[in-house]
Every structure is written in structure tokens, then in C-alpha cells.
């Protein structure tokens, strides 16, 4: 499997941690890493490397600020399955309707939750790590909400564009990382 992983972080130290965790979860696959602002590199990779899936990382940017990471249009228009993690998921939703994103009033929230992933693949109850200021409360009709905890949407899927969005970081928990990424590859890419 040939996957493009796009770094949406501005802080290189945070990205190095993400890179290590994501590579562990994706062992056995060919991984091509690009930064979000390397639009030409991303375009060339999508044209020449026969990419089968795209993973967009979380970020230390905020979707509601002008200074933020941008998802390249060539990714959005690629028709390649996308796993949008945290910020990337928020970014897609924010582009559709700004009011679907809310923010915690007192900054970052870091916490973990245990829950199962019911669709489009099944992962038994596992522990997931969350860190964010912004969170999703509603999605456009093109997205099907799969998991909601209180008012926060944790997982949604856009079947038309094959975008699987998660509001948590599957790469942060070593125990669930490989299971989660393997299930995403098997059910959203190889379907």
C-alpha cells in the first residue's frame, strides 16, 4: 500500500512525534511524507506515485484563525480515500459551514476517552487521545455521523469523497494505532 501522509503541524517537534507514532501504526506500507505547504510536492506525488490513501494529520493551528494550515485543492479533488485526523477533519467541516465548529472558551483541552468504532469498520472499545481547542458539533449532509459523544462529533464519513474524519488521534495510543490504521486501509481503501 502506498500512502501519502501530510503534516499539518507548524511545530517540527510535534510533527516528529506524530511521524514516529504514525509510522509505527502504518508498518508494512510505503509512506511518503509531505508538509502541507509543499503544494507542488503534493501535486507531483499524487500524479506520479500511485497513491492509494491520504492521511492528513492533526495540527497546532486552529481552523478559526487566518494563520492556519491549508489542505491543498489537489488533495480535495483527488478521489483518493482520505483519513482526516482532528484538525484536518475540522478543516473540511469548517470549509463547508463555519458555524459547525465550536471552541472551548479556555483554550486547549487534553483528555482521553474509551469508545468503540462501529462503522464503516468495527474496532472494539479502545482508548483514544484528544487534544483540541475547536470541535465539531454538526456536519454537512454529505457526511454521515458515526460517533457522537455529548455534543461533539467524534467520527463522520463522507462516502461521496471517501473522507473518514476523526476528532481524536488514533496514532497516540500504541495499542490501538495499528488496529485502527489497518482497519481504515482494509475498509476505506481496499473496499
Image (tube, rainbow, N blue to C red):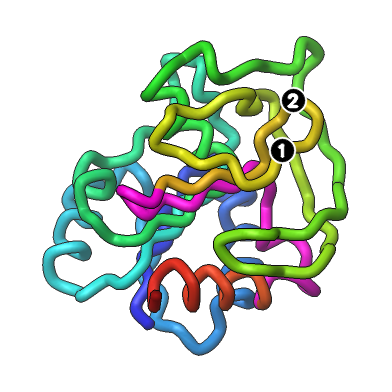
CB under 8 Å between discs 2 and 1: yes
Q: Quadrant of the N terminus?
A: bottom left
Where 185 sits versus 159, above or below? below
Tell me the crowding category of disc 1: few under 14, some 14 to 19, or many 20 or more residues within 10 angstroms, Cα based: some
Q: Nearer the viewer, residue 19 or 104?
A: 104
Could you tell me if residue 20 is visible in this image?
Answer: no
Query: Residue at point 68% right, 45% down?
Result: 147
Q: Tell me the tag on residue 148.
A: 1
Q: In the shown orientation, is residue 187 left or right of residue 18?
A: left
Q: Quadrant of the C terminus?
A: bottom left
User: Which residue bears the numbered disc 2?
Assistant: 151
Q: Is residue 97 magenta?
A: no
**Residue 141, horizontal then vertical, whole percent:** 43, 30
**Residue 5, horizontal then vertical, whole percent:** 42, 61
- Residue 134 image-quadrant placement: top right
Query: Residue at point 76% right, 43% down?
Result: 130
Residue furthest out toward the bottom: 28
Dot 2: what SS? loop
**Residue 90, horizontal then vertical, whole percent:** 52, 32
Q: Nearer the viewer, residue 95 or 190?
A: 190
Where 158 sits versus 186, above or below? above
Dot 1: what SS? strand
Q: In the shown orientation, is residue 30 left or right of residue 17?
A: left
Query: Residue at point 58% right, 74% down?
Result: 183
Q: Is residue 164 magenta?
A: yes
Query: Residue at point 28% right, 60% down?
Result: 80
Q: Nearer the viewer, residue 147 or 79?
A: 147
Tell me the crowding category of disc 2: few under 14, some 14 to 19, or many 20 or more residues within 10 angstroms, Cα based: few
Which residues are the magenta region? 159-178
Amino acid at each position: 500500500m502506498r500512502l501519502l501522509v501530510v503534516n499539518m503541524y507548524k511545530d517540527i517537534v510535534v510533527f516528529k512525534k506524530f511521524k514516529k507514532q504514525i509510522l509505527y501504526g502504518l508498518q508494512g506500507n510505503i509512506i511518503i511524507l509531505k508538509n502541507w505547504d509543499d503544494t507542488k510536492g503534493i501535486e507531483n506525488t499524487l500524479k506520479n506515485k500511485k497513491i492509494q490513501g491520504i492521511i492528513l494529520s492533526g495540527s497546532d493551528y486552529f481552523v478559526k484563525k487566518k494563520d492556519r494550515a491549508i489542505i491543498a485543492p489537489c488533495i480535495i479533488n483527488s478521489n483518493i480515500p482520505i483519513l482526516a485526523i482532528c484538525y484536518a477533519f475540522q478543516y473540511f467541516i469548517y470549509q463547508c459551514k463555519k458555524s459547525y465548529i465550536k471552541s472551548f472558551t479556555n483554550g486547549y483541552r487534553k483528555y482521553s476517552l474509551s469508545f468503540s468504532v462501529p462503522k464503516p469498520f468495527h474496532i472494539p472499545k479502545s482508548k483514544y487521545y484528544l487534544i483540541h481547542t475547536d470541535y465539531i458539533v454538526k456536519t454537512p449532509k454529505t457526511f454521515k455521523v458515526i460517533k457522537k459523544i455529548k455534543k461533539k462529533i467524534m467520527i463522520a464519513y463522507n462516502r461521496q469523497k471517501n473522507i473518514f474524519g476523526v476528532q481524536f488521534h488514533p496514532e497516540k495510543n500504541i495499542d490501538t494505532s495499528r488496529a485502527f490504521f489497518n482497519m481504515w486501509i482494509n475498509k476505506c481503501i481496499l473496499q
